Structure formats: structure tokens, C-alpha cells
Amino acid sequence: MRKPDESYIEILERLYVSVATVLSADADNDQTEEYSTAEHTAKAINLEDYAHELAFLPDLTEALATELDYSAANVRHPELSPELQEKVVNVLKQHEKIMISSGIALPPSVYGVVCDIDIQGHTPIKQKARRVPLCHLKKLYELLRGLLKAGLVSFSTSLWASPIVIVLKKNGVNIRLCIDYKMVNAVTAIMEYAIPLVDDLTDLEKYLWYCSLDAASGFWAITMTRRARQISAFVCALGHFEWLRMPFGLKNAPMIYQRMIDNALWGFVQPKGGWKHYTALMQSAEKRGRSLREESDTNAYTFPGVTKFDADLKASQAEGSVAELVNSLLTDMFTNGEADASELTPVFERRFFVDDICFGGESFEDCLGTLDRLLARHSRSVASVSVSR
């Protein structure tokens, strides 16, 4: 029974206490019983072998920095003079709206790109939750709590469900909690898009100055479509959840992100009507979405028959302004966009692998100028950059 004014986090906490109580009672009743759990030993499975099949649940349990730190060594390199350090900081501050303080903070949604999953008409695949041993239940609760709080996932009513599995790290002690997407990936139509070669980085050997950027929580910057949210749903002992942002482990996630990065750097296409038109639409939708969330919070307290959980769930599943725009034909510029006629020219002569952007210059000013142009291109599509990395 749901209690009034109960939030997602409180619901999860109650589920955790209930499941932990049951598992503890079972263990006390029969100490000799060997429970069947979905736990793989380090000898039987390697994380590298399943990198494209498992979606690792990120650890968001630690408090994240919220203020931008321009005094760190990665910004003010000790080998640069104070004058040159200040020039770097000034360029970064000019593009501060796309800067994220932490590499694992939730970035704003990138414009013009969505994650969709084409399962070619396949019927929903609903797998059962795999049993989690009591010793790992708290870790699962903490990870899910962090994801809910960050707005990366929400509770789901999807007909799809992929299970969570436990993978021991190489030290044989610490664990990784992962979503097993093997069955979903097997029925997903592959997206044909070439990934650049890491060997292209050898071109940098001729430069004297280097600079590297890391996109802030890259995959999380891409919003999931309604269909993708349903298909990517996962289940565990603590409930049924779905992703609001694109996770690792999905078959086409690397290609979707690579295409977004390539377009941010080169400017092949843009949303119909241009970037300014689409930006105005998105900002207006985001403003209406915030008003809807505030209204749902108010209704939970104004109307006694409406619980906080029901209000939150209704708000997350309703076709709000942002959801309507994300699921419209206008949002996916790679399918329904137009040629980019922007005055911004391509920054580089080559491509970069996913979110690791490294470049060089013959002089400091040359390198700094490239950084300025690069951040200007990222600003247009709201592709965030991590200051801490």
C-alpha cells in the first residue's frame, strides 16, 4: 500500500527494507540452503567480454561537485605561465553554459539527437528478475537510489524487462551491477555507421601543443524515445525501471553517440528550421515541463486522494511538452533534418573516437583557437564538456 506524499526514493527504500527482511528470514530459517543467485565469479566472466552486452549501473552514491573549478591542474597546467593559464580559463568561461563540473554529472539533453530502438516488430521480451544475494542488496539499492535521484531512470510499467546480473571485479571482492541486454540486442536492427579508428591518434605526433576534452557523461546526454524507454526497461528484486537517458550496453548506443559527435564537429545536418528555431522550441518545452512537475508536487498535497508516488509517476509518463518534442519527427535531425548552412566551419580534418577528443597545434595560440571553435560548435547543440576531465 502506497503512503501519501511518498516519492520514488521513499518507495524504493520501502522495497529495499521489505526484500532485505525476507532474505534475512530465509537465511535464518535454513543456514545450509544454497541459494541460486545470478552471480558470476571472476574466473567465469570478464567485464571486457561483455562490454557491448551489459549496461553497467553507474555509481552515483557520492556527492558530486556542482561548482566549476577552473583552478585544477587539468585547466591551469603547471608548465604554463600564469598569463597563458588565464587565457585558457577565459576561453572556457566564454562557453560556461555547456561546462559540467563532474564527469559523471547528468548533462542537459543534447539537441537534435535521440536514442530509438527498432526491434523489427518483435513481441516484448519479459525476463524474470534474477535473485540477488543479501550481501549485495544494499549496493543495488544505493545504485538505484542514485539513478532515480539523478533523473536517469524512473519506475516502469513496460512489457519489456531485462534482468540485472552481478559481476565480480578482478579483485574478487568488489562487484559491478549490470543489465543483461543480450536478448534485446539480438532482436534490435543494427544501425550502420562507421566508427573511427583509434590509430588516427598517431597523427598527433607532429604537434608541439596538445589539448584533450572529455564529453560530460556522454551517453546520458541523449534522450530516449518513448519506444526506447519501454524496450530498455530492466527488472530486479527492487522493482521495474526504465531509462530516461541512453545507457551503455544497447546495441546501437556507440553508433548513435558517434554520429552525434561527428555532426557536432563537422556540422552535416541540423533540425528543420535551423538551430535557433529548434533551440527556442526546446527551451519553451523545458519551461512548460518544469511547470508540470511543480503542479504535480502541488497536487500531491492539495488532493488527499493523490499520493506523491502516483503524481510523480503520472508526470513522468504523461506526454509532456518535452516528451512530445522528443518523440516528434522534428527532433531526429538525422532522419528528418536539413543541410547545415551554418557559418561555422568544420574544426578538424579527421574524426574522433566517441567522446575522447584530442587535438594539437603548432603553437599555443593555434591550439587555444581550435579549442574556442570546438566549444562554439558544442554550444550550438548543447553537447556538454566535463571541466574535471
Image (cartoon, rainbow, N blue to C red):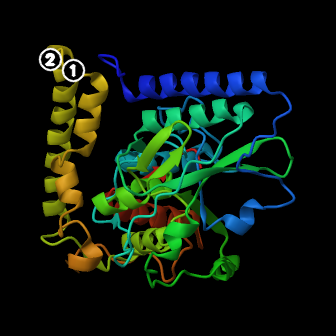
Please indicate whether residue 335 sits to the left or right of residue 203 in the image: left
Query: What's under tag 1, amino acid-wise?
Result: Ala
Res 8 quadrant in image: top left
- Which residue does the image show at 73% across and 65% down from the upper left? 48
The residue identified by callout 2 is 303
Residue 179 x, y percent position in the rendering: 58, 54
Q: Quadrant of the N terminus?
A: top left
Crowding at dot 1, Cα within 10 Å, few <14 / some 14-19 / many 20+, comes out as many
- The reply to whether residue 180 is in sight is yes
Q: Is residue 79 above or below residue 18?
A: below
Q: Is there a contact, CB below 8 Å, between mark 1 and mark 2?
A: yes
Query: Toward the viewer: 127 or 347?
Result: 127
The residue identified by callout 1 is 300
- The reply to whether residue 380 is in sight is no
- Which residue does the image show at 57% across and 37% down from the upper left? 143
Query: Toward the viewer: 269 or 308?
Result: 308
Residue 330 x, y percent position in the rendering: 17, 68
Element at badge 2?
loop
Please indicate whether residue 381 sits to the left or right of residue 318 in the image: right
Please indicate whether residue 23 sits to the left or right of residue 340 in the image: right
Element at badge 1?
helix
Please indicate whether residue 23 sits to the left or right of residue 7 in the image: right
